[in-house]
Amino acid sequence: MKKRCFWAKDEPNVTYHDEEWGTPLHNDQKLFEFLILEGAQAGLTWVTILKRREGYRKAFSNFNAKRVSKYTQKHVEKLLQNESIIRNKLKINSTINNAKQFLKIQEEFGTFDKYLWEFVNYKPIKNKFKNHSQLPTSTEISEKLSKDLKKRGFNFVGPTICYALMQSVGMVNDHTSNCFLYNK
């Protein structure tokens, strides 16, 4: 039996842990997806979001930032009735706003990937935590990222959300040292 990080006990966490979490990601559309999902998670558990992930993909044009940036109040009203996502008006409006800001970063840097990975000098940080209790909820880098994203007009991008984003897209390797994925 494979030894996994403490939180990967059951589905869909096991599949997410084994196939995505902590794996360096450089695809802008997937980065936008994680940015939105991490913001949607605020105040909730990650498994709540994972269970609604397909609903989010359908509701938000498969995380096509150009399309989402053009959503109108009519879209918002429809999304507020969509039971396959978290029906929080602030989070829905934030997704539309963040799509607009995301496109501005792509325009300025060429890709969101280039912008985001610059915060870790384009190389994942490999932490050496032995157990789950040692993992931070934010770091100096996530605070810097949060501050810059907020300055650029993003919402739901506090330091904790930014650190969760960094973990999910592999900017940091926070697999515990006893996890079978630690050295991958």
Image (tube, helix red, strand yellow):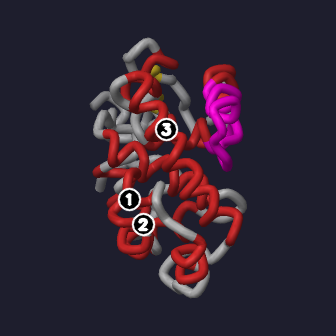
Name the residue type under label 2.
Answer: Phe
Mark 3 secondary-structure assignment: helix
Question: For this rendering, which residue is in front, 16 or 114?
Answer: 114
Q: Is residue 111 above or below residue 61?
A: above
Say which residue label 1 marks: 67
Name the residue type under label 3.
Answer: Gln
Q: Are marks 1 and 3 in contact (CB under 8 Å)?
A: no
Mark 1 secondary-structure assignment: helix
- Give, as a single range, the part of the protein colored magenta: 145-161
Which image quarter is the N terminus in? Answer: bottom left
Q: Residues within 10 Å of mark 2 (few under 14, many from 20)?
A: many
Spatial CA distance of label 3 from label 2 is 23 Å
Q: Residues within 10 Å of mark 3 (few under 14, many from 20)?
A: many
Residue 60: give its label.
2
Say which residue label 3 marks: 167
Q: Are marks 3 and 2 in contact (CB under 8 Å)?
A: no
| Observer able to see residue 103 | yes
* Tag in front: 3 or 2: 2
